[in-house]
Image (cartoon, rainbow, N blue to C red):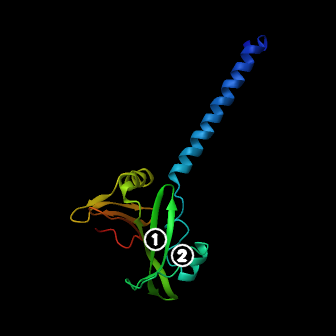
Amino acid sequence: MDLPFDTCPKIAYLLEHYMNRYIFLLLAGFCFVVWSVLPVSAEWEFTKWGMSPEQVIQASKGQAHPPGTKDIPSVLLTQDWESGRFLFVVSYFFEKGATGQVLTRIKLELKNTELKSEVLADLKRKYGPPRGELKGHISGPYWEYQGDDINYLTDQEAVTIHYAPVVSKGR
């Protein structure tokens, strides 16, 4: 049995061309969905909850260092960090654990605060609609995402983003 396009090579070529394009678009769409749904990492960037200060320094490739001042005793390391056009000072909070000091929270303080609305838009794109909103002098949305609490906090001047493991479901 002959197929209709056996007698017309142009039709066979067009059908094959469009089928290849269709398959390519399906694969590209699938890759985009997988890329946008999967997190960049668990916890925050290169860190894992429970890491020691030495492990954080190693994971940051030496960028994390002891802070210049010990204003907050639980902040054992800080570093400057850049994400696209956003500039942050990162503070790593540690608590005493069974194996010594362990990472329990991370605070990112936005240095270029004129971009605070863009940072918030990026967080909403990455984590979806906020779970709720804190109201008051310091306000902002918060998310629960893959076992992490993420809080975007702002007052009239400063912007901070806090990452911590979820410890309880109630707020």
Which badge, 1 or 2, is on the more N-terminal residue?
2
Q: Residue at x 37, y 83 (%)?
A: 71
Q: Which residue is mark 1?
A: 90
Q: Classify 10 Å Cα crowding around label 1: few (below 14), some (14-19), many (20 and above).
A: many
**Above or below — where is 85 with respect to 150?**
above
Q: Quadrant of residue 20?
A: top right
Q: Nearer the viewer, residue 41 or 9?
A: 41
Left or right: where 113 falls relative to 103: left
x and y percentages locating residue 92 in the rendered image: 46, 76
Q: Are marks 1 and 2 in contact (CB under 8 Å)?
A: yes
Query: Can see residue 135?
Result: yes
Quadrant in which the C terminus appears: bottom left
Q: Which residue is mark 2?
A: 64
Instruction: Give me the disc on residue 72.
Output: none
Q: Amino acid at mark 1?
A: Val
Left or right: where 161 falls relative to 15: left
Q: Quadrant of residue 63?
A: bottom right
Q: Residue at x 56, y 49 (%)?
A: 34
Q: Nearer the viewer, residue 75 or 67?
A: 67
Q: Quadrant of residue 166?
A: bottom left
Q: Residue furthest top?
A: 7
Query: Can see residue 3?
Result: no
x and y percentages locating residue 87 in the rendered image: 46, 62
Q: Classify 10 Å Cα crowding around label 2: few (below 14), some (14-19), many (20 and above).
A: many
Q: Secondary structure at mark 1?
A: strand
x and y percentages locating residue 4 in the rendered image: 73, 12
Q: Amino acid at mark 2?
A: Ala
Q: Residue at x 54, y 75 (%)?
A: 64
Q: Secondary structure at mark 2?
A: loop
